[in-house]
Amino acid sequence: MLMLVAAGATALAVQGRYDAQRTAEDRSLAVAETFAHAPGTALALRSPHPAAQLQPATERVQKGSGVDFVSVLDTRGIRITDTDPTLIGRKAEGVGRAAMGEMYTETFHGRPGDAVRAVVPVTDPSRRVAGIVTAGIKYSNVGQVLNQQLPMLLGMAAGALLLATGGAALISRRLLRQTHGLGPAEMTRMYEHHDAVLHAVREGVLIVGGDGCVVLANDEARRLLDLPGDADQRHVRELRLGPGLTRLLLSGETASDEVVRAGDRLLAVNTRPTAPYGGAQGLVATFRDTTELRALTGQAEVARSRLSFLYEAGVRIGTTLDVRRTAEELSEVAVPRMADVVTVELLDSVLRGEEPTSAVREMRRTALRATRGGHPLQAVGEVIRFLAADTPMAAALRRGKAVLVSDLRSAADWRAQDPEGARRTLDHGIHSLITVPLRARGVVLGMVNFWRGAGSPRFEEEDVAVAEELVARAAVAIDNARRYSREHALAVTLQRNLLPLGLPDQDALEVASRYLPAESGVGGDWFDVIPLPGFRVALVVGDIVGHGLQAAVTMGRLRTAVLNFSSLDLAPDELLGHLDEMVTRLDAQTETAAADDDQVPLTGATCLYAVYDPVGGHCTVSRAGHLAPAVVDPLGRVSFPDLPLAPPLGVGGHPFEAGELELAEGSRLVLFTDGLIENRGRDVDEGLAMLASAVAGADRTPEETCRALVETMLPGHPSDDVALLVARTRLLDPACVATWDVPFDVEAVPRVRGEVSRRLAEWGLEETAFGTELILSELLTNALRYGAPPVRVRLLLGRTLVCEVADGSNTSPRLRRAASTDEGGRGLFLVSRFAEMWGTRYAARGKVIWAEQRLEGAPEPDPAALLDVLGI
C-alpha cells in the first residue's frame, strides 16, 4: 500500500509539473504570436527607430499577459526591445530557426536564465522575415503552482496510507477468525495438495505411506495405472501393478524418468521419499505416459534419417557436369545406406548429350556399385534390353513411377526376361528390389534399380518414396549434365570450325600454334595466319571477353571480318580502324535489340594484327588493347618491343597507329592472349617474366617453343582460354628479287620488258616470259599513262612469280570489258586472264598493282584466246 500511495503521489506531481510546463508554453506562444502578428509590429521594425516604438508596447504586453519577459529581435538575433532594458543590444541564443521562418516553443537553458519560451518570426506583407518575437516564463516560476499544491498532495497521500493500513488490519483479523488460526504457509500447502496436485497437473501422482499402502492417488494416476475405486489405503502389492513398478514404489529410492511397463503402456516414473507431518517416511511418485511419445520419437528418427540421407544426396550428386560421373555419384550415395547393390542404366542418346529418344526398351548400364566385391549383375557398359512386358522394369517404364518387389523369390514376373540371370541373382542372396524410371521434364532418361541382399531387411512402401525422391534429384542433375554436354559439344564443334583448320602454306614464316580452351568451356580467343600478295604474311591474335557459345560466335564474326579486310590488303592500322567501326556498329545493333538478353556486346575485344614482309624482314604491327608480342632474336635474346597501343575494339574515338620491327632471319615472333600469362596466382609482369624465360635460347623451332610455353606457363586446366602463335622468320633470297626504276615515259616500256626477259632467262623461266611480258606491258603502260611518278617495277621469285608495278598515284584501276569499237580498255582483262591473281594495294605514297603467276603447271597463253580478247 505504501508503494501504491507513493507511486500515485509521484504520478500526480509529475503530471502537475507537466501540465504547468505545457500551460507556460501555451501562454508564451499565444503572447509571442499575438505580438508578432500585431499590425504595427512589422511596420515598426522597418522604421528608422524600431526600439522607440516597440519598447513601450513590449512592457505593456509583459505586464498584461502574465509572462516573465517579452523581447523583439532583429533577423540577426540582436535584441531591439526587452522587458529587461539591460539586455537590449545583446544577441539572443538559439533563434536561428525563427530567422528561417519557423515558429516553435522550447525549454531554454542559457543566459540570461532558464525559461520556457516561444519564438515567433515577424513577417512583412511579402512573407519575408523582418524580425523575431520571443516571450516566456522563467523556469523557476513554472513549478510555483505545483509547489503550492504539494502540501495538499502529501496530506492526501498520508490519509490514503492510513486508511489502507487500517483496512488491511481489519481484514487480517477477520481472516484469522475464519481460518481457525492457520497461517499462510499451511493454507498454501493445503491448496497446493487439493487443487494443483489432485486436479490441475497432467501427470499421475501417487503417495505411498511408510507401510506400503496408498495414501493418495489423483485421477490421472488412477487412469494410467488402472487402479480400482477402493485403491486408497490398500497395499501396493494388492494393486497388481507389475513387478517392476511394485518394486520401485516399495523400495523408497529416488528415481528420475525411469521407464516402466504398466500393462500396455510405457510410463516414465519419478519417485521421491517424503515424511509428511513428521510421521513415517513414505514415497511420492509421478507418472507420464510415454507410449505415443516413444512411437513418435521412433518415427521422427526415421524421418530425420531419411531427410539427412536426401540432403546428403543433394550435396553429393551433381558435383560435375558429366553424365557418367553423376550416375556414379547416385550409386555411391545409395550404397550402403539405401541398398546393397545399385545399378543405373541410361539411354545412349543421353550419354551422347543428345535429346532422349522414345526408344526406352534398350539402355546401357552406366554405373554399378555393391557393398561386396562380387555381384551377379551385368557389368558397366553392357546393353540392357527390357523385352518382356511383365518385368518390374518394363512396368515401371510403362507406369512412369517406381515398382516395388519386396520378395523376389516369390515373384515370377521379373524372371521372365532372363531366367538364368534371375537364378544367379537369387543364389547370390539378393531378395528385394525397387526399380525407378529416371525421368526429367516428363521424359525418360534411364532406369535405376535398388537391390537388397542377405543380411538386409526387405524394401517397404516407405522406402519407395525415398527411392523416388533420390532418383528425381539425380534425374535433374543428369539432365543438366546432358544439356551441358550437348551445349559444350556444340560450342567446341563451332569453335573448331571457326578457328583455322590448318596453317596455310607459305615461304615467309615457319609457324606453330596452340589453342587451349578454358576449364569452364570454350572462349573467344583466336589466331590466324593469312598469306598476302608479294609473299607477305599477316599474323592475327585476338581475344573476346567472356566464355561460352556466345563468345565463340563473336570470335567467328571478328575472324571473318579480319579475313575480309585483309583481302583488301590494308595496312595494319587501317584494318584495325575498319574493324573498330564494325564492332561499334554491331554494338549499336545489340543495344537496340534489348529484348534478347543473350546478346553480349563486343566492346572490350582485343586484337593484334602484324604483317611480315620477307623482302628485307620488315614487320608492321598494330594492336587494339592487346599485349605486345615477344621477339626472340637468332641468339635467343628476348625482348618486348614498345609498340603503339590503342584502346580495345568498340571503344571508338582513338586513332590506330602501327609500329615497325626489323627482324633478322631466324627471329621468333611470339603472339599470345592474356590467358597464357595471367591467372589467379600471378600478375602480368610475373607472367611476362616466365614467358621470357621459357622462350629464351637459340635454335628452337616454333613447335618446340609452343611446347615449352604450354608446359611452363599453363596448369592442367587453365582458367582462361589461350591462343598462341609462334613464327620464325625467313628472308627471300636477294637473288630472287629484281627491281627497276622506270622513267615516266612510255618509250621506256620496251627497255624494261627486255630487261625483265633477261632476268627471267637467268632464273630459268623462259616458258613464262611471254605471259610475264604481256602482264608487265599492260601494268606498266597503265601506270605511265594514268599514274604519277615515281614508277618502279619489281619481280619476286618464290613458289610463284610476282610482278609489281608501283607509281605515285592513288587512282585504282578498274577491270571492264571493252566494246568492239573501243581502242583500249583490254589491258587489265588480259592481265586477269593470264595471271593467277592480281590486285592493288596502297602504300604511304601511291599504290602497287601486282599480278601473280604459277610456275609449276602454268598453262601457256592461248593465242586464240588472246585474239578473242583483242577482238581480232
Image (tube, grey):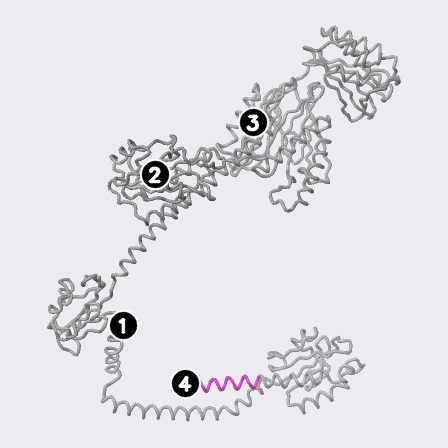
**Marks 4/1: CA–CA distance:** 35 Å
- Mark found first going from the N terminus, 2 or 4: 4
Spatial CA span between label 2 and label 4: 88 Å
Q: Which x, y percent locates residue 268?
A: 23, 63
Distance (Cα) linking label 2 and label 1:
61 Å
Q: Earlier in the sequence, mark 4 or mark 1?
A: 4
Q: Which residue is drawn at 72% across and 19% down?
A: 534
Q: Is label 2 in a helix, a strand or a loop? A: loop
Crowding around mark 2 (Cα neighbors within 10 Å: few <14, some 14 to 19, many 20+) is some
Mark 2 lies on residue: 390
Circle 2/circle 1 CB separation < 8 Å: no
Q: Please tell me whether residue 3 belongs to the stretch shown in magenta.
A: yes
What residue sits right under mark 3 in the picture?
514
Question: Which label lies toward us, 3 or 2?
Answer: 2
Q: Which of marks 1 and 3 is nearer the N terminus?
A: 1
How far apart marks 1 and 3 lie (CA) works out to 84 Å
Which residue type carries mark 3?
Arg
Most foreground residue, 403 or 664? 403
N-terminal of the pair, mark 3 or mark 2, is: 2
